[in-house]
Amino acid sequence: MPEPALPERPVSRRRLLGIGTGLGAVAVGGLALSAAWARRPAATGDQLVSEVPLPQAFSVPLPIPAVLAPVASTAEGDRYEMVQTETEAEIIPGHSTRLWTYNGTFPGPTIESRRGRHVTVAHRNELPVPTVVHLHGGRTPAASDGYPTDLVLPDGWTDTASHHHGMADDLAVVTNVEREYGFPLDQRATMLWYHDHRMDFTAPAIWRGLAGIHFVRDDVEDALDLPRGDRELPLMIADRAFDADGQLTYPSLDPTLTGEIGVEEPYTAGVLGDVILVNGAPWPVHEVDTGLYRLRVLNASNARHYELEATTEDGRRLPLVQIGADQGLLAAPVRHERLPIAPAERYDLLIDFSGLPVGANVRLANRLGSGRTADVMQFHVVREGTSTPIPETLADDLPEWDRSEAVAVRDMAFRAGRVNGRHGWVIDGLPFDPNRTDVTTRLGDIEVWRLIADVHHPVHLHLVGFRVLSRGTGGPLPQDAGLKDTIALRPGESAEIITRFDGYKGRYLFHCHTAEHEDMGMMANLEVT
């Protein structure tokens, strides 16, 4: 039986083009800019060129981020402590690079947690600017979700005028030096990530190193015969660029990250680096055996999109078998020859090295890259191992929302526009305003959102996961399987998603996760009542 049709809210041509009274902030110049960027489908943005001599690909070992131990564990949950601090580390061999870090490392330390077991993370800010922490993908109460103006001020910070970004005093939550974030983690097993989320300056803060991984485990995952221990590899992929002294380069209009927001004009669409880092190492290599491995892949780049492909030296592709998405396990595996991944997306993948001889190399390539950015990392087979079969079924707890139960259908356009007289990014013609509520929904409501993009926009919803219903006039793509929290809209593409706003009441966000777009206006408020 066909599904009942949803009440229609037609999207007119004027709405799609982003012009007219409702979208007056999008000027003709913004549309021309969008059209120019849309003609470059592999990437949205411009690439920086490193000045330091770069290492040969696959010459640096893959680091594995350390797992953070709790400082206290009780029946009520686990408590962790982190210090946000500037440090120096060797990323490009022979050079020391200044970084902003969690606990002195990039990526920050990994947190391992259990579903339904409360985690408290106390953050101390020893950086020269205010910070905010967001657990991306977490089902988190609003007070700990990392709203962009809920700042943690450094010691002695006196710039009181810029704290609130014009936000009403009763909405801003500002603390001095330290703040505790509480995460109930009542959610499916998955890989989350935490990063800075300060209003106007998320992009440069992540670029400088403020990102880390957080795993949630549960009994459903434990019951499956999946690779564990050394055979489960977290892979945080991020591009960067370096100056002649080995320091990170980034085109901020204000390098102190305290004044003028945004980036230099050529990079308004997004900042791309020419060095591909995995877990903070340039084009690393990792030794494996001839067994089955689990790759927990995160695209932590500001703007770069990847299309991953695993190939042997003789050109044979190894399948990338997807078993999970942003919000946990799929119902059944999905096999990919090539897998696109946008900023903030995560994929849970299996790769089988059985059948390869000891000494073989497998290159993880980026088919959207060119030159050095076409390489990501390499696996080097150094010993015999034992492979295990891939489970045919995975999880049976995926939500099945019925379109007929949707209480609202919302149309949203993500486009270039004019913000404060300059190139910027807007949602339905409006740049972000922390004082304005853009969407109000009730706790427990099911809604369908219809999204449309001018150029690449990875759209992220806080608090909830969603299912992809369609793209354009067709169905979801293979990589859309499962429960998502970020959807990669391609240039000129529309998509429908469905979700249930459960969990918690409060003020949340949805935004583009091209970090430069987010900083320059492409973010909106979601109020769950």
Image: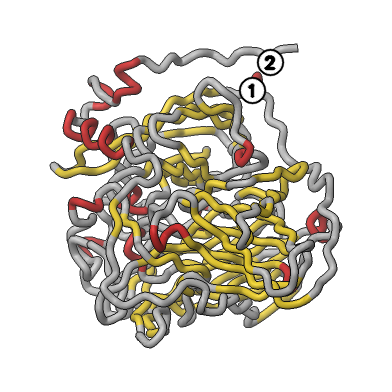
x and y percent of residue 380 in the render?
Answer: 64, 72
Image point (65%, 54%), residue name: 316
Reply above or below: 191 against 358. above
Work out how far the residue at label 2 is from the one at label 1, CA to CA, in angstroms.
Answer: 7 Å
x and y percent of residue 373 in the render?
Answer: 42, 60
Which callout, 2 or 1, points at the residue further toward the start of the chain? 2
Image point (39%, 79%), residue name: 92
Taking the image as shown, residue 433 lies to the left or right of residue 90, namely: left
Identity, as a three-letter code, of the amino acid under mark 2: Glu
Reply above or below: 377 against 299. below
Reply above or below: 12 against 172. above
**Is 379 or 73 nearer to us in this picture?**
379
Taking the image as shown, residue 322 lies to the left or right of residue 66, namely: right
Query: Where is the N terminus found, in terms of image quarters?
Result: top right
Report which residue position mark 2 lands on: 3
Tell me the SS state at disc 1: helix
Q: Which numbered disc covers residue 403?
A: 1
x and y percent of residue 228 in the render?
Answer: 76, 68
